[in-house]
Amino acid sequence: MAVERTLSIIKPDATARDITGKINAKFEGVGLRVVAQKRIRLTLAQAQAFYEVHAERSFYDELCEYMASGPVVVQVLEGEDAISHHREVMGATNPAAAAEDTIRKEFGVTVQENSVHGSDSPETAAREIGFFFSQVEIVG
Ligand code: ADP
Ligand code: MG
């Protein structure tokens, strides 16, 4: 295992319900440190650029509109095996299929409004962290 960094987003359905603190408590409770964090409102163009890998998927337009529909909290999380560990704590994409004790099981609403995003590989994490943060904003 190695110490990694991953990009996390607390999505609009979660910021609307004021549960960003509860979600951060889940991360910190399993050893994922918040080493960068900011609350922003994505433009539609920014959401489209962030999710460009999904441009061919049927849900792409709806997903981008949703991600631009309200504030999000973007974060860098750091820890042992952070990328897979974070995805484990988030749970399956569809909250209905997510395991007990996962964030999506506890807080997710629908397959789209599933409260959190997490990078899925080291390459994706590097791209996604660089999309939102400069080096000086990340303090380990
Ligand atoms: P994950 O976020 O678990 O990595 P994906 O990368 O496959 O999942 O999808 C990105 C996001 O797109 C999901 O988190 C969810 O918000 C949305 N999404 C995925 N599948 C669907 C779907 N079938 N219908 C609507 N939205 C979806
Ligand atoms: Mg994904």
Image (cartoon, rainbow, N blue to C red):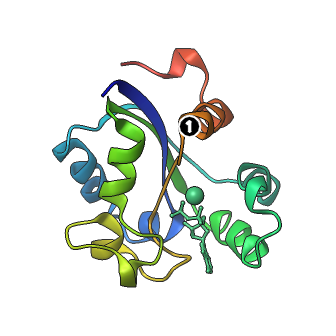
27 in relation to 91, above or below = above
Where in the figure is residue 64, as x and y percent of width and height?
A: 72, 66
Give the quadrant of residue 76. Answer: top left
Q: Is residue 111 left or right of residue 4?
A: right
Secondary structure beneath label 1: helix
Q: Residue at 46%, 72% (x, y): give it.
A: 114
Q: Which of the two residues, 92 or 132, is positioned nearer the viewer here?
A: 92
The disc labelled 1 sits on which kind of residue? Ala
Taking the view exactly as shown, the residue that stands out farthest to the front is 1
Disc 1: which residue: 125
Q: Residue at 51%, 79% (x, y): give it.
A: 111
Where in the figure is residue 13, as x and y percent of width and height?
A: 48, 71
Q: Residues within 10 Å of mark 1 (few under 14, many from 20)?
A: many
98 in relation to 41, above or below = below
127 in relation to 88, above or below = above
Q: Is residue 126 left or right of residue 107?
A: right
Q: Residue at 56%, 37% (x, y): give it.
A: 125
Where in the figure is residue 119, as x and y percent of width and height?
A: 53, 46
